[in-house]
């Protein structure tokens, strides 16, 4: 990969003076000619040369990740990844195969019932994730048959009765286990089973295991059934190298067995069957033989057991195992190789921890008796521990078989966790395929986000020199650096070999480099800005949580509140806890190890004092290591608790036992409440909704118990009886809206699969049912009350579609917007709710575990400020489509369609609670997002979806002088749509610093801006918009002046910011020009309120795009610096600053605003481009409304499309594309995002800087 | 509600899963306090106990002010959705402590006055 910017990037190259030629000559990679260099005010030629070379180098290690990074959840496609994937698959594979103990069997008689609905009607095997149920369901038939003969098997395990019971459950339940969990489970280590008997019987994996174990003997049956799956079998062919990783996973999950048959190593097929998803991934993926071997080897051991008990099995298996022996032989070698390195690391870590512990020894241990019991998860935990451990001892076939099951997967896993810095795999996989797991490590660690720090250093020194020469006192950066390096003596010494390295190449000096904001013309880097990496030692860095899930505004936590106050920066966390992950270790164990006093889950940052005790990293209490935890499945040895997966990954998911439930997991329940008044029918959203629902009915997350219901309302409320057995849906009308009742409570929410035909009938009929309605009123409030009544027994999700101001019954609203005030610069009123009706309703719903999602499709003011409350406090989400009309406004219609597709099919968790814990001394005081705060640190989330983000503000209550690290842990307990209780735990570890310079060095400017935006929303609602705006400006003024006066002693005439904060003013200016906060520009109240809602509940990545869109020039895309995804070449054009100055009439530009893309076509844009990409002969013939790029067979079209597709793939919502001609009226939409330019009501960026400078000097 | 398994009576879930329970302060505490205190203040004025009236006046005024100034969308003085934000809980606690001190003071004053009145009889 070469540097990205050699591309004929006209704007940049035009500006780059010939000098740069020197730079180009200086190194092959150098040409990256970053626009900025030449503009540096006083840079002599040499320094300019240096910068480019620095920049030029970094792309090499930098670019590749950039390619992968945004791919985000869905796809891990490119080749280099394979190695990693393999690790994970190999490693996290062995699913939970549980021997069901009497205990669980008794507990779960209901399970059979629950899953007993039989295999669902055949599904469509779609290519969409999560839709593989079809294969699975038919597989289940097979399993059912297979499972019968095998009950004798049971003897081998502990209790026959149970087993058979379970197997029947399994066979029935199997279908329900598929699709949805694809992402999480596959690669997941559902660590297993045999020794962890008390899995809930409902747990799919266990069942799968049984059935599949049985399967081999009934070979013919199985073969037949699989041959039936020609679709599934067909897949493997594309599989080998490029196909999307997720795809693999899902295949391996649902159609697992099929896949295995067709994979090259046939012998492994059986193994795969035996362990279901285990090996499939490994075999399917193109890569290293050792993983395959590994996966092969495991089964051998596993099968040993069956051999003893059932002769039939043994005959079948013996053949298989003989083929497998060679790989098995590999095994000792391979594990050793992969383990050694990690173990080194671990030892060092252990040592370091030891030291840490000593440091901490002074902190008082908390009393033994646990007192904090207010979390539901906690209530029975201890009891659970006792219970389950007893079952373990009685029922489990012991480590022996455990070994067999776990087999070689663990060594593998270890190596993978060693090689992948963040356990949670997603964002920046190692660029190069890693032959040795550790090889990429150093580069990885040293690899900066956004800048080539290490590479830059020399260049940087030169670069600053000129700056310093004009600005006398110089180099606060260095002064900051010195103490920094010695900050953590303990760590330094202990991990001197590894950690020292990372400290030396520490990015700090770069992030402290003073930047003269007013003189730096191109402040925006050419490549997207990444999260800064906390300055931890190598081991911890590697283990730390991915910045996509968990970010802190200050990656160096100040030691005292006084220091924080001095820095004038906001301290807080930004969370995206339920993000779609491609790889996530899932842990099934009957004792979830937690601190006895603060209930923290064990995590990579705890310290093991000795073999039997660990010290909590949040409260410093010393806890015992439970017996079960002592056994380390990784090495199959006893007494290595620190190598357990929980301690190796900072993002893990536990399958929770029944102790974490207050009631049996409820089915997924979806209720749609639809406005059918005249206004709604006119807008025509029903057609789109019903169409989407019909398409996605089978993809709704849930098991066979999934229930669905519909209600419509105008001035009356209509219910639909969909009870199975009716010939057609029955409409029941309730006109008494003052006291709503449910006409037939039992048949309004019906099983999706039993009543599917009726549901389809209804969906087909709905769009035309109300075409002639003259009812203009809308009784939203009563409809919601009815919905609440309907949902309260089970909880679930209510989706409300509303098109106007509710005008009847409870919760009616009046129009509060004065259109003349839309562009007022003074007071913006009515940002808060007009009534508490919706808030109360939301709290009621939240109490009954029901979330209300609002889709507002209105053409006029609908008081979103009031309506939004129903979603805000019930943990729902809000969608808003201003001036929606299905024909007049096709782009909104398309957006609704896309949003609905995502909305209906995305993952969902029910009955969730989220608790955030932090190290003693820190405290949380304000939360942002959609939820109800139930106690000081417990958020109640009726539903959780992967697109929800949260923010938390922190304060430092006690000095952190006696600790060098602080940790934050988020635990999200939820019921999956398959009826499993799960806990997702993220842990973030950050260093504590004592000097102001270090605090500035660690600022995560994006996180800070997002947190500020959240705070500003609160402020504008509780106080006023102008207050909020002032507060935003003051945040910049205060932090920069604090920096200027304390850290740098540069002259005050210049506006100096540390490099880490250089984008701060720009982002804040962007915020001020955001719809939510702008004044002077005409903004409808609903638009403003919606923007505020989005700020509150979007995860950071999306929010940043919303605040500061990315602009690319796309008419001259080249393959320079392109990345390869999925065999496609994706060009990587450099980022342009958001200013009209960059828009040349000869160009075409793409603006990525997160939820919408604009392509701006300049007036004199090259006709070749227009013809090749847009498919029109010239500029004049481009239509005004164009929302798609045609698929043309030209190189430039291909490039443009692959770039746009790549951008789209990175986010859950696929954004709508608008082609904007230079002179079309739509161009104002585009131009309002050019935030660096002056508007009639707001500063340009430069003016804003001057304004700040003035404020500072005051 | 749910069948709360083995929930101790103090279990946060058992209590808090009924957010309705959180509205009750408004009905059962804020309004009675407001009315009671206003009546007492007025009675003191009527019976010409000037000193005690003046002592009570600021507190009664504060109560009324707080009640009136609640934004339209909020659920009473103690809004369960807001109370954990921006240290509101702390300030409410502080306020409650001050009121407690005040009422304690009043209690002894009234007691003293009562005894005095009894003796004078």
Image (cartoon, rainbow, N blue to C red):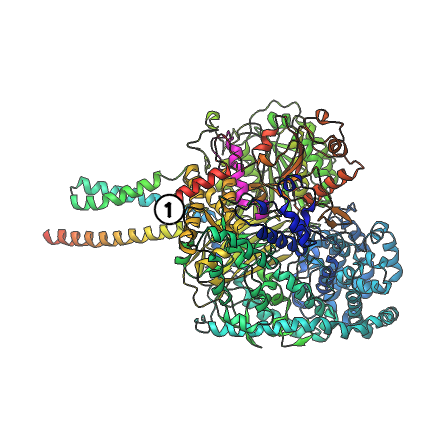
Is residue A616 toward the left or the right of residue A797 in the image?
A: left
Residue A674, how many percent across, how many down? Answer: 62, 34
- The residue depicted at 74 percent of the width and 41 percent of the height is A1199
Q: Does residue A99 appear anywhere in the picture?
A: yes
Indicate whether residue A231 is drawn in magenta.
Answer: no
Crowd band around label 1 with a 10 angstrom C-alpha radius: few (<14), some (14–19), many (20+): few
Is residue A1038 toward the left or the right of residue A306 in the image?
A: left
Image quadrant of residue A719? top right
Please report the bounds of the magenta region as a residue range.
A1075-1102
Per the image, the residue denoted by label 1 is B28
Q: Does residue A1021 appear anywhere in the picture?
A: no
- Along the viewing direction, whichever of A206 and A24 lies nearer the viewer: A24
Residue A1058, how many percent across, how many down? Answer: 49, 52
- The residue depicted at 86 percent of the width and 62 percent of the height is A266
Indicate whether residue A1080 is drawn in magenta.
Answer: yes
Tally the marks.
1
Q: Examine the rendered structure and indicate whether residue A323 appears above or below residue A916.
A: below
On the rendered image, what quadrant is the C terminus of chain A found in?
A: top left
Residue A817, how many percent across, how many down? Answer: 47, 28
Residue A486, how many percent across, how many down? Answer: 49, 68
- Along the viewing direction, whichever of A1022 and B55 lies nearer the viewer: A1022
Is residue A283 toward the left or the right of residue A206 in the image?
A: right
- Along the viewing direction, whichever of A1033 and A1026 lies nearer the viewer: A1033
| Chain that bears disc 1 | B
- Along the viewing direction, whichever of A1141 and A810 lies nearer the viewer: A1141
Of all residues, the one furthest to the left in this rendering is B120
Q: What secondary structure is marked by label 1? A: helix
């Amino acid at each position: 990969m070469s540097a990205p910017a050699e591309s004929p990037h006209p704007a940049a190259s035009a500006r780059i003076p010939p000098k740069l030629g020197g730079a180009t000559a200086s190194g092959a990679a150098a040409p990256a000619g970053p626009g900025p260099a030449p503009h540096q005010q006083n840079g002599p030629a040499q320094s300019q040369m240096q910068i480019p070379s620095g920049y030029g180098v970094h792309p090499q290690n930098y670019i590749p990740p950039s390619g992968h990074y945004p791919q985000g959840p869905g796809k891990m496609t490119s080749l280099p990844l394979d190695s990693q994937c393999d690790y994970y698959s190999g490693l996290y594979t062995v699913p939970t195969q549980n021997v069901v103990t009497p205990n669980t069997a008794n507990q779960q008689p209901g399970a059979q019932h629950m899953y007993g609905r039989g295999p669902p009607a055949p599904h469509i095997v779609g290519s969409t994730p999560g839709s593989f149920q079809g294969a699975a369901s038919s597989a289940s038939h097979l399993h059912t048959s297979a499972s019968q003969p095998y009950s004798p098997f049971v003897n081998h395990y502990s209790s026959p009765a149970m087993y058979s019971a379970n197997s029947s459950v399994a066979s029935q339940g199997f279908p329900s286990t598929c699709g949805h969990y694809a992402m999480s489970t596959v690669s997941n280590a559902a660590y297993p089973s045999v020794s962890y008997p008390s899995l809930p019987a409902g747990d799919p994996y266990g069942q799968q295991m049984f059935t599949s174990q049985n399967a081999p003997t009934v070979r013919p049956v199985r073969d037949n059934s699989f041959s039936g799956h020609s679709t599934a079998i067909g897949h493997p062919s594309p599989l080998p190298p490029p196909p999307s990783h997720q795809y693999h996973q899902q295949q391996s999950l649902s159609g697992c067995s099929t896949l295995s048959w067709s994979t090259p190593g046939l012998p492994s097929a059986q193994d795969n069957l035996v362990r279901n998803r285990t090996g499939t991934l490994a075999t399917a993926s193109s890569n290293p033989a050792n993983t395959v071997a590994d996966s092969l080897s495991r089964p051998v051991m596993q099968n040993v057991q069956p051999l003893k008990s059932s002769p039939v099995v043994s005959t079948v298996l013996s053949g298989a195992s003989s083929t497998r022996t060679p790989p098995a032989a590999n095994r000792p070698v391979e594990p050793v190789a992969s383990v050694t390195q990690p173990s080194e690391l671990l030892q060092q870590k252990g040592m370091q921890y030891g030291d840490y512990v000593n440091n901490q020894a002074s902190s008082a241990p908390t009393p033994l008796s646990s007192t904090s019991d207010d979390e539901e998860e906690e209530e029975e935990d201890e009891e659970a521990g006792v219970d389950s451990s007893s079952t373990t001892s009685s029922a489990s076939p012991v480590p022996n078989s455990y070994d067999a099951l776990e087999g070689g997967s663990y060594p593998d896993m270890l190596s993978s966790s060693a090689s992948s810095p963040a356990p949670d795999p997603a964002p920046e996989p190692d660029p190069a395929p890693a032959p040795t797991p550790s090889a990429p490590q150093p580069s990885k660690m040293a690899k900066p986000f956004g800048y080539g720090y290490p590479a830059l250093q020399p260049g940087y020194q030169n670069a600053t020199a000129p700056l310093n020469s004009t600005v006398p006192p110089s180099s606060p950066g260095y002064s900051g650096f010195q103490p920094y390096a010695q900050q953590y003596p303990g760590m330094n010494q202990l991990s001197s070999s590894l950690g020292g390295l990372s400290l030396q190449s520490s990015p700090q000096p770069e992030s402290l480099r003073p930047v003269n904001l007013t003189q730096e013309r191109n402040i925006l880097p050419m490549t997207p800005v990444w999260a800064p990496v906390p300055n931890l030692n190598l081991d911890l860095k590697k283990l730390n949580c991915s910045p996509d899930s968990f970010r802190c505004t200050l990656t160096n936590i100040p030691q005292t509140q006084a220091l924080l106050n001095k820095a004038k920066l906001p301290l807080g966390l930004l969370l995206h806890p339920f993000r779609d992950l491609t790889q996530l270790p899932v842990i099934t164990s009957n004792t979830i190890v937690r601190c006895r006093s603060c209930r923290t889950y064990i995590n990579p940052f705890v310290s093991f004092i000795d073999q039997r005790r660990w010290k909590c990293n949040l409260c410093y209490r010393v806890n015992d290591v439970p017996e079960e935890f002592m056994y380390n499945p990784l090495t199959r040895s006893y007494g290595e608790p620190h190598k357990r997966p929980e301690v190796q990954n900072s993002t893990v998911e536990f399958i929770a036992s029944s102790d974490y439930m207050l009631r049996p997991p409820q089915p997924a329940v979806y209720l749609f409440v639809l406005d059918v008044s005249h206004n709604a029918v006119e807008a025509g959203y029903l057609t789109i909704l019903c169409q989407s629902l019909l398409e996605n009915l089978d993809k709704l997350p849930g098991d066979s118990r999934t229930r669905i219901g519909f209600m419509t309302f105008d001035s009356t409320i209509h219910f639909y009886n969909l009870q199975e057995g009716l010939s057609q849906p029955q409409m029941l009308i309730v006109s008494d809206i003052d006291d709503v009742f449910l006409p037939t409570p039992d048949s309004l929410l019906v099983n999706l699969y039993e009543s599917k035909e009726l549901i389809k009938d209804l969906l087909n009929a709905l769009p035309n049912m109300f075409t002639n309605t003259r009812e203009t009123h809308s009784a939203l409030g009563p409809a919601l009350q009815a919905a609440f009544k309907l949902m309260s027994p089970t909880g679930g999700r209510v989706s409300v579609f509303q098109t106007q101001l509710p005008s009847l019954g409870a919760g009616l609203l009046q129009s509060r917007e004065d259109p003349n005030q839309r562009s007022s610069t003074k007071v913006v009123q009515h940002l808060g709710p007009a009534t508490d009706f919706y808030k109360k309703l939301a709290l009621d719903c939240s109490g009954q575990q029901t979330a209300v999602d609002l889709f507002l499709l209105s053409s006029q003011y609908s008081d979103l400020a009031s309506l939004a409350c129903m979603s805000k406090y019930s943990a729902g989400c809000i969608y808003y489509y201003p001036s929606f009309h299905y024909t007049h406004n096709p782009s909104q219609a398309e957006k609704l369609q896309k949003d609905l597709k995502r909305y209906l099919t995305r993952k969902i968790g029910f009955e969730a609670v989220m608790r955030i814990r932090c190290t003693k001394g820190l405290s949380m005081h304000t939360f942002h997002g959609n939820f109800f705060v139930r106690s000081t640190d417990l958020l109640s989330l009726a539903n959780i979806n992967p697109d929800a983000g949260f923010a938390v503000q922190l304060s430092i209550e006690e000095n952190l002088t006696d600790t060098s690290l602080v940790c934050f842990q988020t635990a999200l307990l939820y019921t999956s749509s398959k009826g499993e209780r799960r806990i997702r735990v993220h842990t973030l570890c950050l260093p504590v610093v004592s000097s102001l310079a270090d605090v500035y060095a660690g600022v995560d400017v994006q996180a800070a801006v997002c947190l500020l935006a959240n705070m500003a929303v609160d402020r504008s609602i509780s106080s006023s918009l102008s207050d909020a705006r002032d507060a935003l400006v003051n945040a910049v003024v205060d932090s920069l002046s604090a920096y200027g006066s304390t850290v740098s002693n540069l002259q005050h005439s210049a506006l100096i910011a540390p490099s880490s904060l250089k984008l701060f003013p720009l982002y804040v200016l962007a915020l001020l020009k955001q719809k939510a906060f702008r004044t002077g520009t005409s903004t409808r109240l609903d638009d403003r309120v919606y923007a505020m809602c989005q700020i509150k509940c979007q995860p950071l990545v999306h929010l940043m795009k919303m605040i500061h869109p990315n602009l690319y020039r796309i008419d001259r895309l080249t393959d320079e610096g392109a990345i390869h995804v999925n065999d496609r070449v994706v060009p990587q054009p450099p980022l342009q600053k958001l200013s009209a100055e960059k828009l040349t009439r000869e160009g075409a530009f793409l603006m990525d605003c997160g939820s919408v893309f604009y392509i701006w076509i300049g007036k004199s844009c090259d006709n070749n481009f227009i013809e090749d990409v847009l498919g029109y002969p010239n500029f004049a013939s481009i239509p005004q409304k164009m929302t798609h790029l045609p698929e043309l067979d030209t190189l430039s079209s291909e490039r443009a499309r692959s770039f746009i597709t790549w951008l789209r793939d990175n986010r859950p919502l696929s954004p709508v594309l608008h082609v904007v001609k230079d002179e079309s009226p739509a161009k104002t939409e585009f131009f309002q995002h050019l935030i660096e330019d002056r508007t009639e009501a707001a500063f340009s960026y430069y003016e804003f800087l001057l304004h700040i400078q003035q404020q500072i000097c005051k | 509600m749910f069948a709360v398994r083995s929930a101790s009576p103090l279990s946060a879930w058992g209590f808090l899963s009924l957010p309705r329970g959180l509205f009750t302060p408004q009905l059962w505490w804020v309004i009675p306090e407001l009315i009671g205190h206003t009546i007492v203040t007025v009675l003191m004025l009527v019976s010409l106990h000037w000193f005690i009236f003046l002592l009570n006046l600021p507190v009664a005024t504060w109560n009324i002010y707080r009640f009136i100034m609640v934004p339209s969308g909020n659920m009473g003085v103690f809004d369960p959705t807001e109370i954990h934000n921006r240290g509101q809980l702390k300030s409410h606690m502080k306020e409650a402590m001050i009121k407690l001190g005040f009422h304690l003071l009043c209690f002894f004053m009234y007691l003293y006055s009562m005894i005095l009145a009894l003796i004078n009889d």
